[in-house]
Amino acid sequence: MSPIGIFGGTFDPIHYGHLRSAFEMLQALRLSEVRFFPSGDPPHRGSTYATAQLRLEMVRAAAAGQPGFVVDDREMRRDGPSYTIDTLNSLRKEHPDASLGLIVGMDAFLGLTSWHRWDEFLGLAHIVVAHRPGWRAPDIGALGDIIDRYGTHQIDDLHDKTHGKVHIHAVTQLEISSTEIRELVAAGRDPRFLMPDVVRDIIVDNHCYT
Ligand code: ATP
């Protein structure tokens, strides 16, 4: 039972940090696919910089041609805030017997307890944490507890069970962030080599961060 990887984000814009993590997860965890979910109205932050439509276009362009990369726009089609719990519930309905793995970076994982109904996530999916530069796994508090109780080093556990495990996985550390890319573009510099050229072209053509 190969897990479906669920990779949500603002992707404002998508960059090689996201893509490399997703690709390494796809291969190392033997996922059936990684599904990208660009958020419509992210509850954690103010408005986005590029429009939802443009962010979706960038994610689609970045994922095109990579077997196993799938783009899912349901969060953009939903009204109101993009809550992960709603995405997990709707995926679970569509795939009642599949293994689902919610992929988050360590920075996102450390903020997990502020996510809407986060304590229901493990009842629906596994949580797979991608190590990011400069972040350590928590060993105390609510997150330390769930790592203690549900943590596993065994990739097979993610295949044998449909949900309920936490797996921390080191990925190649690419110190790239969307924030830095937006600042760089706003300063008139070229974001080439931080993202696929097709994504850079969309940014240049639409002047979305200038
Ligand atoms: P921003 O700088 O605007 O906050 P970001 O670059 O962190 O954006 P998001 O779209 O907010 O990107 O992140 C989506 C997911 O990708 C999160 O789980 C985040 O932890 C992860 N992620 C972001 N950048 C990287 C990176 N360089 N390497 C690995 N994972 C990353």
Image (tube, rainbow, N blue to C red):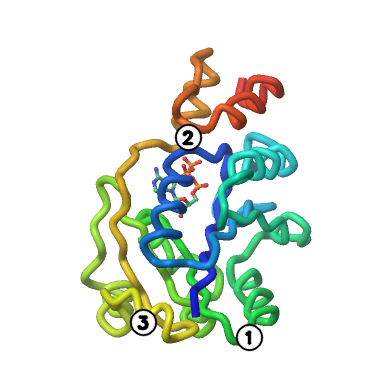
Looking at the rendered structure, the kind of residue marked 3 is: Asp
Tag 1 and tag 3, C-beta contact below 8 Å: no
Looking at the rendered structure, the kind of residue marked 2 is: Thr
Q: Mark 1 points at which residue?
A: 96
Looking at the rendered structure, the kind of residue marked 1 is: Pro
Disc 2 residue lies near ligand 1 with CB under 8 A: yes
Does residue 9 lie above or below 192 as drawn? below
Q: Earlier in the sequence, mark 1 or mark 2?
A: 1
Q: Specify whether 34 is left or right of 23.
A: right
Q: Which residue is drawn at 62% across and 65% down?
A: 83
To which quarter of the image does residue 37 belong?
Answer: bottom right
**For this rendering, which residue is in front, 105 or 27?**
27
Q: Specify whether 208 is left or right of 189.
A: right
Q: Is mark 3 on a helix, strand or loop?
A: helix
Image coordinates of residue 45 in percent, x first then y, are 56, 49
Between tags 2 and 3, which lies in front?
A: 3
Q: Name the residue under label 3.
A: 157
To which quarter of the image does residue 16 belong?
Answer: top left
**For this rendering, which residue is in front, 136 or 43?**
136
Compute the Cα span from label 1 to label 3: 18 Å
Q: Residue at x 46, y 53 (%)?
A: 22
Q: Crowding at label 2, few (<14), some or many (≥20) Cα neighbours within 10 Å?
A: few
Q: Which of marks 1 and 3 is nearer the N terminus?
A: 1
Compute the Cα span from label 2 to label 3: 35 Å
Q: Crowding at label 3, few (<14), some or many (≥20) Cα neighbours within 10 Å?
A: some
Tag shown at residue 114: none
Quadrant for the C terminus, please.
Answer: top right
Does residue 142 lie above or below 179 as drawn? below
Q: Which of marks 2 and 3 is nearer the N terminus?
A: 3
Tag shown at residue 179: 2
